Amino acid sequence: MRWYGKALGFLAGWLLLRHPAGGVLGALIGHVFDAELWRGGRKNPYAVLELSESATNAEIDSAYQKLLLQYESDRLSNLAKDLREQAAKRVKEIRWAYQEIQNQRGKQ
């Protein structure tokens, strides 16, 4: 997860309002930008697959396969339960992104 929006927001809020409460307000605003909540909670599917929007279909397929292998449940079976759950969430996110890109490109 990104952190620099929170840190910069905290610093800017504290300096602008000259009060610790300003830092907290700035950190909250930074969190909104770090988590991309201003997009309505929807992530950019290309960013999930770590690609640019100009990626070719072959690059998309390759990135999808590479990321799925990275989070494959068989490889992560020796990890703690919470880490396996995080990996399962990441796999769902990767599959969603791939399907979203396929839907977008199929409509063009």
Image: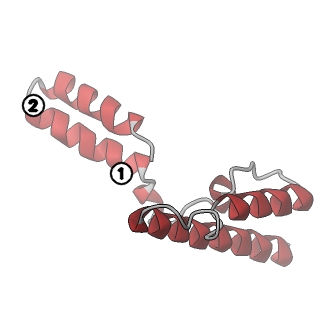
Q: Residue at the location (84% across, 58% down)?
A: 62
* Residue 14 x %, y %: 17, 27
| Location of residue 83 by image quarter | bottom left
Q: Is mark 1 on a helix, strand or loop?
A: helix
Quarter the C terminus occupies: bottom right
Residue type pointed to by label 1: Val
Residue under the point 84% across and 63% down = 61
The quarter of the picture where residue 41 lies is bottom left
Residue beneath label 2, please?
A: 20
- Mark closest to the chain's N terminus, 1 or 2: 2
Q: Nearer the viewer, residue 63 or 18?
A: 63
Contact, mark 1 vs mark 2 (Cβ under 8 Å):
no
The spot of residue 94 in percent (x, y) is 64, 66
Around disc 2, counting alpha carbons within 10 Å, would you say few (fewer than 14), some (14 to 19), or many (20 or more)?
some
SS at badge 2: helix
Q: Which residue is drawn at 49% across and 67% down?
A: 84
How far across and how far down the image is residue 45, in percent?
Answer: 65, 62
Q: Residue 32 carries which label?
A: 1
